[in-house]
């Protein structure tokens, strides 16, 4: 009887651990380029409800790596479509609706611009200027890593 009780407790513990792991995976939201902005009005782009809700959380996003500004860059631009040139812009007022800046958590080899990748990292939202490069962004994934899909 005691042996069966221990098995039941062990089985229940394993089930709870599996359920907790599944819930932890749910915390990392999948974000698509079409979900970044809610609408475009006379004042420009407005962030979507989903984007605001995921702010500060771990997100996953698929896209293409635009050619980096320089080889030793700590970041790259994730784009909706493959691009031949990097879509850097002069200010956040000109910020395209289909790019996200990705700051890596560690050095990784850049991928070809036509290779689909999946990025995972923490979502930051709002205008920010990189102090090293002067690059202005509206949406960033930081502490990121990526894998070829």
Image (cartoon, grey):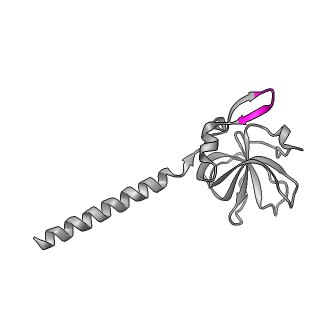
Q: Does the rendering let one see residue 109?
A: yes
Compare residues 96 and 126 and report the one nearer the observer.
126
Q: Is residue 91 above or below residue 11?
A: above
Identified at 44% across, 53% down, the residue is: 23
Q: In the picture provided, is 67 more to the left or to the right than 50?
A: right
Q: Residue reaching furthest top?
A: 42
Please count the marks in the image: 0
Identified at 62% across, 46% down, the residue is: 62
* Residue 18 among magenta residues: no
Identified at 70% across, 60% down, the residue is: 104
* Residue 74 in which image quadrant: bottom right
Dominant SS in magenta? strand
The magenta-colored residue range is 41-46
Q: In the picture provided, is 55 more to the left or to the right than 41?
A: left
Compare residues 74 and 11 and report the one nearer the observer.
11
**Location of residue 103 in the rendering, given as x and y in whole percent from the top left corner:** 72, 58
Q: Does the rendering let one see residue 149?
A: no
Compare residues 145 and 84 and report the one nearer the observer.
145
Identified at 55% across, 47% down, the residue is: 29
């Amino acid at each position: 009887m005691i042996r069966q009780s221990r098995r039941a407790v062990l089985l229940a513990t394993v089930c709870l651990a599996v359920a907790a792991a599944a819930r932890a995976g749910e915390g990392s939201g999948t974000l698509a380029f079409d979900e970044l902005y809610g609408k475009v009005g006379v004042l420009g782009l407005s962030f979507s409800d989903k984007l605001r809700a995921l702010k500060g959380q771990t997100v996953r996003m698929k896209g293409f790596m635009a050619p980096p500004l320089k080889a030793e860059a700590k970041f790259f631009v994730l784009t909706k479509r493959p691009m031949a040139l990097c879509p850097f812009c002069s200010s956040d007022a000109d910020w395209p609706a289909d790019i996200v800046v990705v700051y890596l958590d560690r050095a990784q080899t850049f991928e070809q611009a036509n290779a689909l990748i999946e990025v995972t990292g923490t979502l930051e939202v709002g205008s920010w200027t990189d102090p090293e490069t002067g690059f202005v962004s509206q949406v960033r994934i930081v502490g990121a890593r990526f894998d070829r899909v």
